[in-house]
Image: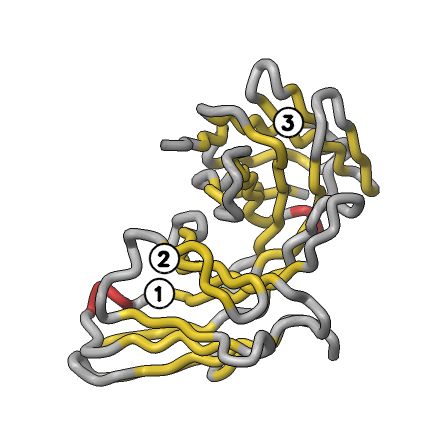
Amino acid sequence: DTGVSQDPRHKITKRGQNVTFRCDPISEHNRLYWYRQTLGQGPEFLTYFQNEAQLEKSRLLSDRFSAERPKGSFSTLEIQRTEQGDSAMYLCASSIANEVSGNTIYFGEGSWLTVV
Amino acid sequence: ELKVEQNPLFLSMQEGKNYTIYCNYSTTSDRLYWYRQDPGKSLESLFVLLSNGAVKQEGRLMASLDTKARLSTLHITAAVHDLSATYFCAVRSNFGNEKLTFGTGTRLTIIP
């Protein structure tokens, strides 16, 4: 499978615990994105990497959220001291900078987080 | 701040009929995307529209872009049940960032 891979697919955690999600982008894609989606809403942008550099970060990404892409390949999104409002699907996406193709952005299957 | 509005939010239509979903956005943009999402699943890329007047077609779906009107449409021809899903448009503003702003989605139900 050469698509965007996310792990775990589902996570149930108690409020106050830390969680980490991993994303493996499509091979050779230099751009990686994290979005969050709650039920009945469209995805909301969280952050964006080009290679290992984190170039954009949403105001939605509070101090409890941190994302890394240490070698420009896979990425992790960590949420510290989880709150019930963090319950959502966390989507990872990747693309390759290619103005000819229009920079199609491919999404992974998502990681569902439930905070109880 | 870029705002993206879709309408209708809900659409129930009979098989064989044609319909159009509209996507309006508030600031200039150089790129517009259409995605499909099935319940509990991720987003499937349908179209990327780059320039004014761009039109793309895939099967029973056709998307177009009017950058002057800040409007994109997704037209469904002779709908079939398999097209039931939620459809999102997403817009990238042309101010040098990579953030996509998504619309609220249109939940489409095709009735036999």
B66 left or right, relative to A62: right
- Residue positioned 64% across, 27% down in the render: B73
Q: Position of residue A64 (x, y in %)?
A: 23, 71
A67 left or right, relative to B8: left
- Residue positioned 60% across, 14% down in the render: B68
Q: Residues within 10 Å of mark 1 (few under 14, many from 20)?
A: some
Label 3 and label 1: CA atoms lie apart by 29 Å
Q: Secondary structure at mark 2?
A: loop
Residue labelled with disc 1: A88
Q: Secondary structure at mark 3?
A: strand
Question: Is residue B18 something that shows in the picture?
Answer: yes
Residue labelled with disc 2: A38
Q: Mark 1 belongs to which subunit? A: A
- Residue A82 found in image quarter: bottom left
Label 3 and label 2: CA atoms lie apart by 25 Å
Q: Are marks 1 and 2 in contact (CB under 8 Å)?
A: yes
> Between B71 and A75, which is closer to the camera in this rendering?
A75
Q: Position of residue B22 (x, y in %)?
A: 57, 26
Residue labelled with disc 3: B73
Q: Are marks 3 and 2 in contact (CB under 8 Å)?
A: no
Q: Position of residue B16 (x, y in %)?
A: 76, 33
| Amino acid at circle 2 | Thr
| Amino acid at circle 3 | Thr
Q: Mark 2 belongs to which subunit? A: A
Placement of the C terminus of chain A among the 4 image quadrants: bottom left
**Are marks 3 and 1 in one subunit?**
no
| Amino acid at circle 1 | Ala
Q: Residue furthest front?
A: A53
